[in-house]
Amino acid sequence: MPLDQLHEEERFQKEKGEMSFFDHISELRKHILRSALAIVVVGIVAFVNKTFVFEQLIFGPKSPDFITFKLLCLASEKMGIGSALCFKPPVFNLITRQLGEVLMQHLYVSFWLGIIGAFPYLLWEIWRFISPGLYDHEKKAASGVILVCTLLFFMGVAFGYFVIAPFSISFLAGYTLEGLEVAPTLDSYVTYMTMFTLPTGLIFEMPVIAYFLAKIGLLGPNAMRAYRRHAVVVLLIIAAIITPPDVVSQTIVGIPLYVLYEISILVSAQVAKNKEKLLLNNIDTLPDHSPNN
């Protein structure tokens, strides 16, 4: 180990010993309270904008004027295939069966929008809590992680909202039997919308998870390549869980999940390459104790 890294470790151990277990618990409580406050603030903003949140955001994917349907129709015309890709979701009405269902779903939606909107701040609070326990070179290696995690999360949420939600809702609302009228409850609709967006945002964090697992030695590119077939099966199961039981929706979700897995392999391989390079540099800095010296 290089001399400067040894000094860094000694300084780290000295600073680490200055805080007791209860000091860490107290510090964690502060971060949790600030995170909860951020969720509440964003949730209140969503709550007071009820009309926009429900009519534009929540009910948007079931509207024929949703941007995804418009873009598909435009792409169909640009490709010269007429209206082959133009389709509209089936018309259906939402109902409520309980007196307080609208209020409860309003609070439920506001809470989840609070988490989504405050997600960058939540990541920053997590980083503020764990960063004092890292070495300087570990902090440097993890620089930009908040930005990357935020971008991946919002990409996943956007993919779920603009791709998974409209196609899945169209499939579920159009799948019926003769003599039956599709009239889902507001609770059911909001639950599906949550399932289509929030889990997808978390799944898109796969490359970041692979990076940290590779850093601590629990995951490597060779293992990920060796178990690629098993991973594909797991990814298809995940796609089946967050989508309706039809092949089209599962394929739409499964393809980007597989791409993320391949990206995770590349990330893991780069981490392994950096580790090997650092090990060779440390070996080169060791003093030579050969008899000739």
Image (spheres, grey):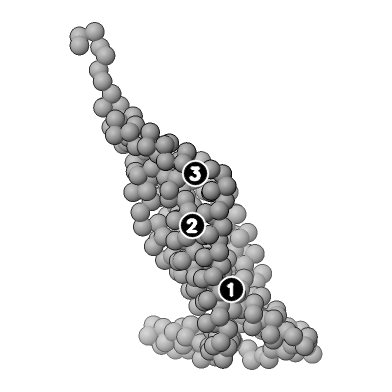
* Picture disc at residue 190: none
Of the residues tagged 1 and 2, which is closer to the observer? 2
Q: Which badge, 1 or 2, is on the more N-terminal residue? A: 1
Closer-to-camera residue (83/238): 238
Label 1 vs 3, first from the N-terminus: 3
- Image spot of residue 57 (x, y percent): 54, 84
Residue at 49 percent across and 73 percent down: it is 117
Q: Position of residue 181 (x, y in %)?
A: 75, 89
Q: CA distance from mark 2 to mark 3?
A: 18 Å
Q: Which residue is mark 1?
A: 112
Residue under label 3: 19
Q: Residues within 10 Å of mark 3 (few under 14, many from 20)?
A: few
Q: Where, quadrant-wise, is the C terminus in this rendering?
A: top left
- The reply to whether residue 165 is in sight is no
Residue 174 coordinates in the image, percent (x, y): 66, 84
Question: Could you tell me the amino acid type at mark 1?
Answer: Trp
Q: Amino acid under label 3?
A: Met
Q: Cα distance, mark 1 to mark 2?
A: 19 Å
108 with respect to 256 (left or right): right
Q: Is residue 281 above or below residue 45?
A: above
**Up-down relation of residue 247 to residue 214 (above or below):** below
Where residue 126 is drawn, which disc sits there? 2
> For the point 64% across and 83% down, which residue is it?
106
From the viewer's perspective, is the residue at label 1 or at label 3 nearer? 3
Q: What amino acid is at disc 2?
A: Ile
Considering depth in this image, is 87 or 184 the residue closer to the camera?
184
Pick the front one: 97 or 25: 25
